[in-house]
Amino acid sequence: MKKWIWMAMMMAAGGCAPCLAGWIFDGLPSDWESAVPELQADEYTYPILVLELGGQWTDFELKGSTNNFETLSYYVMSSGTNAWTTDPDVAVYFTDDYSADVRKWHRAVAGTPIGEQLADPVNSVVGYVAVCPSGAGGAGSQWMSARNPALVWSYVRYDGIGLEMNATGTKSRWRLVTPAGWRREQAAP
C-alpha cells in the first residue's frame, strides 16, 4: 500500500501519521533523491533558443552573458557577415510561409541575412527562429549549461534596414529570451 494512502487512512481514523521522507513504488521503498537521475554538468549544454520575429522582422542579434551583460559570453547576428559572431558554426533555423513546404525548418546560410533567403522576400513572414549554438561557440563548456543560473540571453530584431528601436528612436529594443530546451548535442533537424 502506498504510504500516502496509509497516511490518509490513519488521519481519517484519528491517528497521527509520522512524517516520512519517501514513498513506496511497486512495493519497494524509495526516496525522491534517488528517484531522479543525477544531471551531469556536461550532458545538457546545447540550448535551443526560440526568438520571436514576425512582421517585417526577418533577422536578429543575440547575446548571452554570465554577469548580466557586464561582458559578453556569446554573440550571434543573422543579418550579414559573421565577422562579429562568436560562434562560426551556429545553426539558425526558420520557417517560410511562401516556401514549397511551409512546415520545413530551413537552415540559414551563414553570412547571408535570413531576409535574403526567403522564397518571397516581400511577402514572407518569419514568425520565429530557432538558434542552436555549436561547440565552437562555447557550448560544451561550463558556462553554457542548463545548470548555470547566471546565464542570461537577450536579442534584438532586425528588418534588413535597422534594428528595432524604442518609441523615441533613442535606443534599440532588446528582448529577453530563455532556452526552450537543452540537449546533449546541437539540434540538427
Image (spheres, grey):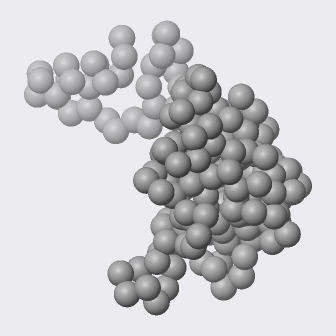
Residue 113 locus on image (x, y percent): 70, 56
Give the quadrant of residue 118.
top right
Residue 139 locus on image (x, y percent): 80, 53
Q: Is residue 32 above or below residue 169?
A: above
Indicate left or right for 138 with 189 as reference. Answer: right
Residue 167 locus on image (x, y percent): 35, 81
Residue 51 locus on image (x, y percent): 54, 53
The count of marks equals: 0
Q: Is residue 77 above or below residue 108?
A: below
Identify the residue shown where x is 50% and y is 65%: 176
Q: Nearer the viewer, residue 85 or 153?
A: 85
Residue 83 in sight in this render = yes
Q: Nearer the viewer, residue 46 or 32?
A: 46
Residue 184 in sight in this render = no
Identify the residue shown where x is 28% and y is 19%: 6
Q: Nearer the viewer, residue 53 or 17?
A: 53
Identify the residue shown where x is 59% and y is 22%: 101
Indicate left or right for 56 with 112 as reference. Answer: left
Identify the residue shown where x is 55% and y is 63%: 159
Quadrant where the C terminus lies? top right
Quadrant where the N terminus lies? top left
Q: Nearer the viewer, residue 182 or 101?
A: 101
